[in-house]
Image (cartoon, grey):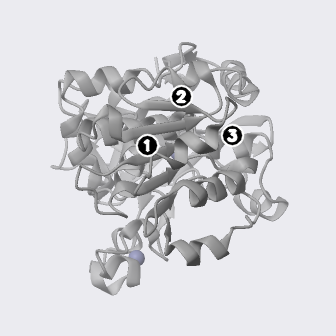
Amino acid sequence: MNNQLKNKVIQLTKPYKFELRDKNIKIDSNDIVVMPTLCYICAADLRYYTGNRRPEALKKKLPMALLHEGIGIVEESNAAFNKNDRVVLVPNIPGYVLDRKEQKECCIACELEEVGENYCENGIFISSGYDGLMQKFIVHPKECVVKIPDDVPSEIAALSELVTVSYEATKKVKINGDERIVVFGDGPVGYLMYCVLSFIYKIPTNNLLIIGTDESKLNMFEFAQKLNIRGDEPFYDAASFHPTYVFECVGGNNMGDAINYAIDIVRRGGSIVSMGVSEQNVAINMRDVLEKGLTIKGSSRSTRHSYPVILEYMRAKLFQDMLSKVICERRFEVDSIEVLKDAFDFAASKDYWGKIMLTFEGELYERK
Ligand SMILES: [Zn+2]
Ligand SMILES: [Zn+2]
């Protein structure tokens, strides 16, 4: 393998502006060279694109290639993979993999399994201060590259980052399968959490309640009870459900309302797992947290160890059918910067359901 690679990278240089740049990158003996082929736009990518981050964060992290949810095909590898293997790229690279040292020598998150290496102090996350998948080639450590089983379609496999994030959030509580569970949020994060709870944990339709604000989105959640809080007497219905666990998948400006609503409806001694992201501090009704003996846990990102587990579940046709509903009907074949901009402008419009899929065509990077 060459240890230098002439690469092309599309970086966000400032909000709403992408630029194609040449970049030489070094390849380590442990690295795999992968050509990204199919990605989804994440809310985190959109916050950079629209400039909806604190000015210090923007200044520190740009210019940078966006996208971290995706797959590619292997271009060059040592023995670990074959050329043209379809692989998922794990965006979270823990410090001990980067620095090639023992896991327990890295940090407290890597040392203690119950914390998890997604909270590593020394790790990096691509498209968060480091170039993401918007490149002709990505050079990635072999530990963070996962082969896709042949019977998992590419557009399903590319959802594995999001699905592992939901899966790891469920590990924050102990689910036996007979408790009542609420998913708060009818967007893609809520939908994938619902898929994990329904398919992997087999939570029956009657014990799973989705709370949202949009009737057409709520209709996507086939195997669950639904509650539209813009409807009549919503509080009464949700409280009488007596959930043991509430997964908050709202984030943004409404996150505070969602958490406080969750505090109102969760049963005594129950837990709230928070997955939404908000740029603002959130005021929480701590009085009732104390009075009801509640636990609030945060969950963010996922580790490379969950990917093979999720890809194995993804071989099931029913799981594929459930997951495919989260893919937005409008898809973008990106063969120019203009199309890329169209895709991000469409994503920023918020006038659609689901995850926006991008496929990368040859002409963009002069691949042909
Ligand atoms: Zn993401
Ligand atoms: Zn660490």
Q: Is residue 270 above or below residue 114?
A: above
Pointer 3: residues within 10 angstroms few (<14), some, or many (20+)? many
What residue sits 37% from the left and 75% below the top?
A: 115
Q: CA distance from mark 1 to mark 3?
A: 16 Å
Vertical arrangement, residue 117 with respect to residue 155, above or below: below
Question: Camera-side residue: 120 or 2?
Answer: 120
Q: Quadrant of residue 146?
A: top left
Disc 1 and disc 2 in contact, CB within 8 angstroms: yes
Give the spatial CA distance, label 3 vs label 2: 12 Å
| 187 left or right, relative to 89 | right
Which kind of residue does numbered mark 2 sit on? Answer: Lys
Instruction: Mark 3 vs mark 2: give the one in front.
Output: 2
Q: Which residue is mark 1?
A: 162
Could you tell me the amino acid type at mark 1?
Answer: Leu
Callout 1 environment at 10 Å: few (<14), some (14 to 19), or many (20+)? some
Q: Quadrant of residue 241?
A: top left
User: Which SS class for mark 3?
Assistant: helix
User: Marks 1 and 3: which is nearer the front?
Assistant: 1
Tell me if residue 142 comes above or below residue 230 in the rendering: below
- Could you tell me if the residues under marks 3 and 2 are in contact, i.e. CB atoms within 8 Å? no
- 295 relative to 181 in the view: left or right: right
Secondary element at image label 1: helix
Please tell me the numbered disc located at residue 264.
none
Please name whichever residue, 300 or 254, is drawn nearer the observer in this view of the structure: 254
Q: Which numbered circle lies on residue 355?
A: 2
Residue that mark 3 sits on:
46
The kind of residue on which mark 3 rests is Leu
Residue at position x 52%, y 72% in the image: 292
In the displayed structure, 353 sits above or below 256; it is above
